[in-house]
Amino acid sequence: MSLFYEVRTYGCQMNVHDSERIAGLLESAGYAKAEGQEADLVVFNTCAVRENADNKLYGNLGMMLARKEKDPNFQIAVGGCLAQKDQNTILKKAPWVDVVFGTHNMGSLPTLLERARHNNEAQIEILESLEVFPSTLPSKRESAYAGWVSISVGCNNTCTFCIVPSLRGKEKDRRPGEILGEIQALVDDGAVEVTLLGQNVNTYGVEFGDRGAFAKLLRACGEIEGLERVRFTSPHPAAFTEDVIEAMAETHNVMPQLHMPLQSGSDSILKAMRRSYRAEKYLGILDRVRELIPNAAITTDIIVGFPGETEEDFEATMEVVRKSRFASAFTFQYSKRPGTPAAEMEGQVSQEVVQERYERLLELVNAIAWEENQKLTGSDVEVLVATGEGKKDSQTNRMTGRARDNRLVHFEIPEGAETPRPGDVVNVTVSRAAPYFLVADSVAGSKYELRRTAGGDAWDRSQLESCGAPELGGSKVTLGLPIRTKREL
């Protein structure tokens, strides 16, 4: 009889990918995913970057205590960045936790759970360096038609606001053959889209001495038959080179999309952040990308209220935003992260000032995003039909997907037309735009062309839930927004 598990994920795409590995490990060990039934095991895959991450974890662990007291065989495991950072603190604050494991030894989880069960005592194992590269572990993918592929882990930068290098370690690169082999296996299993992951993907190759390795990897992805879409996140502006831009432009399945964190448009703040580029270099990269890929959608991350930020510094950020014309932006309010140099810096900005600047930035980002989306009205876009982006629209026959440039598209299926499956591709005509998404209504003269893909076949085989789109009748749409109303760092 199987034990049922649940994985709760917090944080970035790397954590999402790690959770797929955790799920794969557990299923290989005989567990089954809890689908409506009560879980025998709950795994928290934590993040240490978000403000109050520890409070949220301990609050959730507190809610587990009653279940643990009722059923001593119920197990709780905590992994991820917060586990790597806090280590023994977790068991001191929540002694009912069974297993604590770090970012470097996910593969030990099934053994640690069994040991905790057998010995009837908590197990903690935190390694200070990578034990096994995560992508060598089994995976339970959330999507049948898309997959994450780690090309590196860790980071060699020393940004003063970031705790990730101390938790993930120095950059470790996989060999190209291993990466391409994993991508091929995903395609063979029905995936039509992959996203290459790394803390700084464009420094890939530094460990084995090939500075051109990332551009070569992108071009190699273009040779994989059946792989329709390749994305990557996140590059660092300081290491963004011409060969990568050319590879993006010349490789047919590398999507016209670039997410490149800005963080600040002020050179003095970038220096204080230890971001080894300046606003002029950043804008120059965008100019070159748009020269070679005119339809590229560029997105970014921005921090408001970093220590020492003056009104002049903030206005410099606003000016870079105006020039950059971002399709969307993840905007963060700075907050202290214990263990980072920025937390000890002088000139901490008051919350009132941070909030006021944040609201001004958000207004500008949203206005530009809407203007950029409106330019696409009347154009035809290719949409990869998605799941998990929203709920079924009860008023219209709509589904949801992502355009090649990663914009969210809600499209209407014409009466009598075939219904696509997640993983299929449709070509539709944009009828109107909003700041956060595009709409393709079925109106006179609009296009609706469906192409079945291996991704749709894989979806059918996976027997996962069907998807839909959120209701669009009012002004409030809160699902799948690429621009957040509030996120904090």
Image (spheres, rainbow, N blue to C red):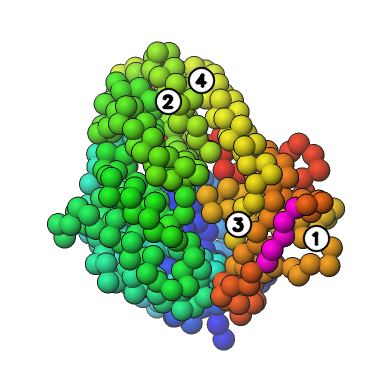
Above or below, 215 against 76 in this view is above
Q: Position of residue 474 (x, y in %)?
A: 79, 39
Binning the other alpha carbons within 10 Å of mark 3 as few (below 14), some (14 to 19) or many (20 upward) gives: some
Q: Which residue is mark 3?
A: 382
Binning the other alpha carbons within 10 Å of mark 4 as few (below 14), some (14 to 19) or many (20 upward) gives: some
Callout 4 amino acid: Arg
Tag 4 and tag 3, C-beta contact below 8 Å: no
Callout 3 amino acid: Glu
Q: Nearer the viewer, residue 230 or 158?
A: 230
Which residues, given as a range, are shown in magenta? 446-450
Number of the front mark, 1 or 4: 1
Query: Marks 4 and 3, Cα distance to the nearest angstrom?
Result: 37 Å
Callout 2 amino acid: Val
Q: Nearer the viewer, residue 244 or 292?
A: 292
User: Quarter of the image holding residue 336?
Assistant: top left
- Helix, strand or loop for disc 4: helix
Query: Marks 2 and 4, Cα distance to the nearest angstrom?
Result: 15 Å
Tag 3 and tag 1, C-beta contact below 8 Å: no
Instruction: Please state, as top left, top right, bottom left or bottom right, where the C terminus lies in the image.
Output: top left
- Helix, strand or loop for disc 3: strand
Earlier residue among tags 2 and 4: 2
Say if residue 198 shows up in the picture: no
Number of the front mark, 4 or 3: 3
Q: Position of residue 227 (x, y in %)?
A: 46, 69
Callout 1 amino acid: Pro
